[in-house]
Image (cartoon, rainbow, N blue to C red):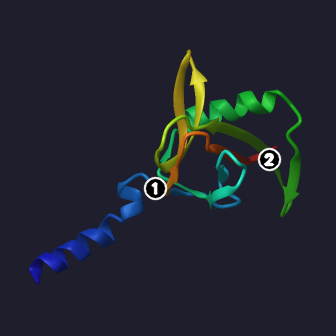
Amino acid sequence: MNKIILFLFAFLLFPICDSFGGYQTELGDDLFIFVQSTIRNSDGTLIAYLESTKFTDLNRLRLESFLDTEASRGGDPIIILDGQNYQVIRRVQSSSFDSDGLVASTILSYKIDGKQTALARFAHDGYPVQSGDTLKSMWTFIRPVS
């Protein structure tokens, strides 16, 4: 009984999402992130569709640098919500699988100094893939601008 009480007390003090680095983004935050992933087989048939605003890993410093670089290319719209200007940056990452397996996370990565660097990770229950399947992830970032 004491172990259960201790566990519940520890759970209340240290919520699981904080202790494991979980981040829930919401519109109006300094940075809102929304990812939509579609997985299709080699015939183009939809295998899985996933979406989230919750991430288990965010490399905020590198992500902000990435977004600044992407925004400098131009073409990203500015919208007004409740009198505040927001920049909407959408980017798509695509890949194909060359072997069978199970994928349990969607990762946004970017080449920095010649090395792929993870910027954000959305962990999920996973989906099976076979050679020839494709993944397309649309990342939407909304951040306030002046």
**Which residue sits at x=36%, y=63%?**
16
The percent coordinates of residue 120 (x first, y second) are 55, 43
Residue 22, label in figure:
1
- In the image, residue 55 lies at what x, y percent? 52, 53
Determine the secondary structure under disc 2: strand
Instruction: Tell me the quadrant of the picture where the C terminus can be found.
Output: top right
Label disc, if present, on residue 88 of the rendered structure? 2
Tell me: residue 10, above or below residue 20.
below
The Cα atoms of the two marked residues, 1 and 2, are separated by 23 Å
The amino acid type found where label 2 is placed reads Val
Question: Label 1 amino acid?
Answer: Gly
What's the residue at 70%, 59% (across, down)? Answer: 28
| Residue lying at 77% horizontally and 44% vertically, measured from the top left | 90
State left or right for residue 91 relative to residue 51: right
The quadrant of the rendering that contains the N terminus is bottom left
Tell me where residue 45 appears, x and y as whole percent.
70, 55
| Residue closer to the observer: 93 or 32 | 93
